Amino acid sequence: MTIADKLVLQRQHHLKWRSFDRLELILMMMCGVLCFGFSLSVTADIVTRTIGHPWLWLQEVTSTLFIYAIFIGAAVATRRNDHLYLTAVSEAMHGTPRLIVEIIIRIVVLGVAFCLIWFGYINYLRGFGSFRLPSGTPIASLYAAIPLAGVLIALFTVEQLVNGIRNGFDHPEPPEQDRDIPSVDADVQMRARP
């Protein structure tokens, strides 16, 4: 990696808003806990059904953990440009065409985020009329994840738009380090044997 590449990577890192770095870390940890809890609840559900004493409330826990992990994960993936992002199209371009395509992509993602917020909130309000069994909790507890994810996705997309318009979207990927395996001289090995 050249010094210029290191400077570009340092500049990219400083362009991100520091408070969002902490938020991203917290959301990633939440995703890990949610996925672990999901796996644990599925395992417990299988075990309790196998022994003939099912805990019916485990299905509610499983679905809640799964839904929140998906929507929070989508928000984190948006921050990392791993999701809702058309990399193949934009990375093939440079300069002004790339800037235009990157802005259009992020405007589309912003539109999706606003749909998640608007329609998710409508579903959240309507969810107070339906209840989950056997606990009787409103189904709105599940729908709350949708507008929450929309707000996070919109926040991270605005961050990307501001940074991209100010500094450009065309940042080179860091080169992979060469991991060449050194060749073995067979003559040296043959002479080393007794």
Image (tube, helix red, strand yellow):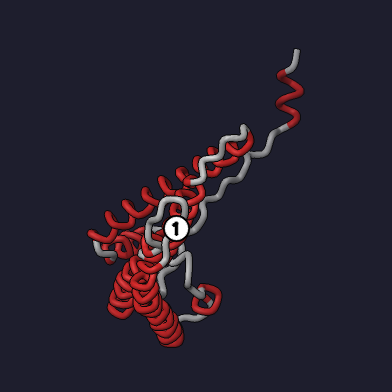
Number of residues whose C-alpha sits closer than 10 Å to that of mark 1, classed few (under 14), some (14–19) or many (20 or more): some
Q: Is residue 75 visible?
A: no
| Residue 43: quarter of image | top right
Q: Which residue is mark 1?
A: 132
Q: Residue at x 47, y 43 (%)?
A: 36
Q: Nearer the viewer, residue 140 or 193?
A: 140
Is 133 above or below relative to 86? Answer: above
Using residue 61 as the reference point, say whether residue 45 is left or right of it.
right
Residue for point 69% across, 34% down: 184
Marks counted in the figure total 1
Amino acid type assigned to the residue bearing label 1 in the image: Arg
Residue 21 visible in rendering: yes
Q: Compared to 140, does 134 lie above or below? A: above
SS at badge 1? loop
Quadrant location, the C terminus: top right
Please tell me whether residue 147 is drawn above or below residue 141 in the rendered image: below
**Is 17 drawn above or below residue 112 in the view shown?**
above
Residue drawn at x 57%, y 35% is 53
Question: Which residue is rendered at x = 49% and y = 54% of the image?
Answer: 63
Residue 135 picture location, percent across and down: 41, 51
Q: Quadrant of residue 45?
A: top right
Q: Residue furthest top?
A: 194
Asked which quadrant contains residue 103, the reply is bottom left
| Quarter of the image that includes the N terminus | bottom left
**In the foreground, 79 or 146:** 146
Q: Find residue 29 and report its horizontal and vertical position in percent.
A: 37, 48
Q: Position of residue 23 (x, y in %)?
A: 28, 57
Residue 27 position within the rendered picture, expressed as x and y whole percent measured from the top left: 35, 54
Q: Is residue 114 left or right of residue 53?
A: left
Query: Which of the two residues, 64 or 57, is positioned nearer the viewer here?
Result: 57
